[in-house]
Image (spheres, grey):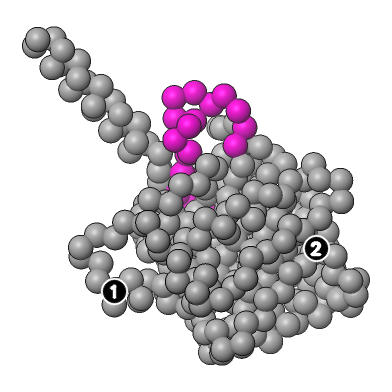
Amino acid sequence: MLKKILLSAILSLTVAGASAQKLTAHTGTVENGYNFWLYTPESTIEEEIEPKPVVIFLHGASLCGRDLNKVRRYGTIDAIDKGRSIDAYVIAPQNPGGAWNPEKIMNIFDWVSNEHNVDYDRVYVLGMSLGGYGTIDLAAAYPDRVAAAIAMCGGATARDLSVLNDVPLWIIHGTADRAVSVSQSDRVVSAMKEADESTPRLKYNRVPGMNHSNPARMFYLPESYEWLFSHTLKDAERQIAPTFSITNDVLKTAYTGLKFTRKQSSSSRSKKRSSGRRG
């Protein structure tokens, strides 16, 4: 009986240890990179049998700095912390300040791909505000490596935006955004249309009346990741998949089934949801 109790305790500790290893912090790990969180999907903890997609989450300016815990305040890692199931590796770098550097982001991906069994044909990026800028810039720098992207209330610093027409890209921006003007996304779309009027792989939701914080709910909707995962570099035409409606009713369902601690009041959650501001 004692042996059974001890064995049960050991197994419990092992499971707890494996669970704790699902999310790991990396500081100074990648030369010419950022500090980052890495989420390893539960199905690969014991044995990496099949390659898994990779999701890169880029935060807004309010989470910049050198305290990695800030990156868990909102976004994809926070969604996972709260119980959202995402069957993919998730890279969440922290920008110490300034514009996102696509090369540094991809250096992190290269490190992760050397350490884990990733699916090179299914690499995705999504971000909001400053992270929206980073998403566009990363897709513009590596259109042949990013399978699909979601850029929210951002813009671009990349000079050549014509290559974005090669990437399934979903841009979301509210007309009532006072932190980052919708004109920034308009400029990106105009540049894409100048290169190819049909913009065959672009979906632009220019949402009337939406403010800067509401798009953050997209990080918590399972449909956002389902949309990303529906794309692969193996698609002959790299067609963009149908998007879902960005309405208040849809966004209100973002936190359904997720877990919030008692200390997180509705006001503090609201503060988190609005914390993706670029400035």
Q: Which mark is residue 266?
A: 1
In primary-sequence order, the first of circles 1 and 2 is 2
Residue 16 screen position, x and y as percent: 28, 33
The residue under label 2 is which amino acid type? Arg
Camera-side residue of 13 and 230? 230
Image quadrant where one finds the N terminus: top left
* Residue at the disc numbered 2: 201
| Label 1: which secondary element | helix
Which residue is drawn at the image coordinates 41% and 72% (left, top)?
A: 273
| Numbered marks: total | 2
Image vertical order of residue 239 relative to residue 115, above or below? below
Q: Residue 78 carries which label?
A: none
The residue under label 1 is which amino acid type? Ser
Task: Check the image and name the residue furthest to the left.
Answer: 2
Q: 10 Å neighbourhood of mark 1: few (<14), some, or many (≥20)?
A: few
Residue 167 screen position, x and y as percent: 78, 58
Which residue is drawn at the image coordinates 85% and 65% (left, top)?
A: 200
- From this viewpoint, is residue 104 visible? no
**Range of the magenta residues?**
34-52
Which residue is drawn at the image coordinates 64% and 56% (left, top)?
A: 227
* 261 sits left or right of 20 in the view: left
